[in-house]
């Protein structure tokens, strides 16, 4: 059974889903844009018999509070700090694995590089950490990152449109008819909340802060060699298969699977991904790299 919880962190409500035995190994599922913990609805039951699963909604997403951009500074540092407080201070976790997808990668890698002793394993699913993983789809954002104004915001606002949300789920899927419309409909409901455009634009404008940390994350990978599974939708229009392969430079012991699906690989491949996660978490930890 999955249970649903709300806690207050810095005066804001943070929602998370929880399942599995309280004394089992913990895996934290970190969602991407424009989704929420809802994206893990099929994966959670496939892990909960053996693992303690935690899946939060970030501030501004899903069932967590979405304070106005004037009341909360929407940066990846702040989103990660809130998740960090949930995991360490509210839930009292000391050891856990992370599953990162899209925005979940900069959130999870910030936490992992700050708390390497806490991280047992990493599952990467279309969550980028290398320059070669950034596709040409990001080109329209260059002017927005360089000089944000009403004009440079225009192409970026298209990322918030209903047709784009549906595209993110269906593009590259080997069987688009198998992708439930519940996925993009649920996400769009939250994207369309009054004021949410400002929230999402602030976060999108902060995206270069993630690229600035790539070298730091690579050092973390090299020095600590966490057990790593990479399951990547090869048809993702945003993050390329080259970005998946790049992890092997710093994590040569990682297991890599390029899947015939898109950005939200769980929509078609939750069974395969769950089986690989179960095998990963049952395997011995990789040896740490020598300094």
Image (spheres, rainbow, N blue to C red):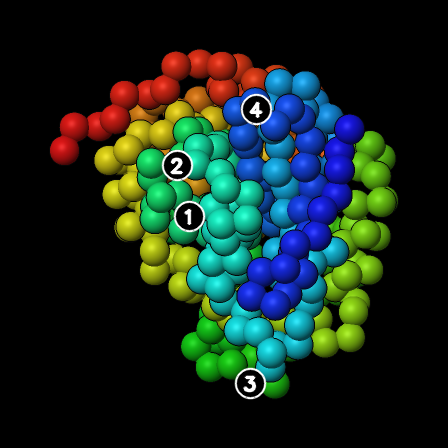
Which element type, helix, strand or loop, lies under badge 2? helix
Comparing 79 with 141, the one in front is: 79
Callout in the foreground (1, 4): 4
Residue at x 70%, y 52% (from the top left corner): 6
**Label 1 near label 2: C-beta < 8 Å?**
yes
Which element type, helix, strand or loop, lies under badge 4? loop
Residue receiving disc 1: 111
The answer to whether one can see residue 155 in this image is: no
**Label 2 near label 3: C-beta < 8 Å?**
no
Say which label, 2 or 1, has the lower sequence index.
1
Residue receiving disc 2: 118
Q: Quadrant of the N terminus?
A: top right
CA gap, disc 2 and disc 1: 9 Å
CA gap, disc 3 and disc 4: 50 Å
* Label number found at residue 23: 4
Say which label, 4 or 2, has the lower sequence index.
4
- Expressed as whole percent of the image width and height from the top left, the position of residue 173 reads 71, 36
Say which label, 3 or 2, has the lower sequence index.
2
Callout in the foreground (2, 1): 2
CA gap, disc 3 and disc 2: 41 Å
- Expressed as whole percent of the image width and height from the top left, the position of residue 5 reads 71, 47
């Amino acid at each position: 059974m999955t249970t649903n919880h709300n806690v207050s962190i810095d005066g804001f409500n943070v929602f998370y889903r929880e399942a599995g035995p309280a004394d089992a190994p913990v895996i934290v599922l970190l969602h991407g844009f424009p989704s929420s913990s809802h994206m893990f609805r099929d994966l959670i039951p496939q892990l909960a018999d053996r693992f303690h699963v935690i899946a939060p909604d970030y501030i501004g997403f899903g069932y967590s509070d979405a304070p106005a951009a004037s009341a909360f500074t929407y940066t990846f540092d702040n989103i990660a700090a809130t998740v960090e407080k949930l995991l360490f201070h509210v839930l009292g976790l000391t050891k856990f694995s992370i599953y990162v997808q899209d925005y979940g990668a900069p959130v999870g890698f910030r936490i992992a590089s700050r708390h390497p002793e806490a991280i047992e394993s990493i599952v990467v699913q279309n969550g980028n950490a290398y320059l070669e993983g950034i596709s040409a789809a990001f080109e329209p954002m260059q002017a927005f990152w360089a000089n944000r104004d009403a004009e440079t915001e225009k192409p970026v606002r298209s990322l918030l449109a209903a047709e784009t949300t549906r595209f993110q789920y269906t593009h590259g899927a080997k069987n688009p008819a198998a992708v439930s419309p519940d996925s993009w409909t649920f996400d769009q409901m939250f994207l369309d909340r009054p004021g949410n455009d400002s929230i999402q634009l602030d976060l999108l404008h902060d995206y270069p802060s993630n690229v600035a940390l790539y070298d730091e994350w690579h050092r973390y990978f090299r020095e600590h060699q966490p057990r790593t599974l990479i399951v990547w939708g090869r048809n993702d229009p945003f993050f390329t298969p080259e970005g998946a392969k790049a992890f092997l430079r710093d994590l040569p012991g990682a297991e890599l699977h390029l899947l015939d699906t898109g950005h939200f690989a769980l929509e078609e491949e939750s069974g395969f991904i769950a089986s690989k996660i179960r095998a990963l978490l049952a395997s011995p930890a990789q040896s740490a790299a020598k300094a």
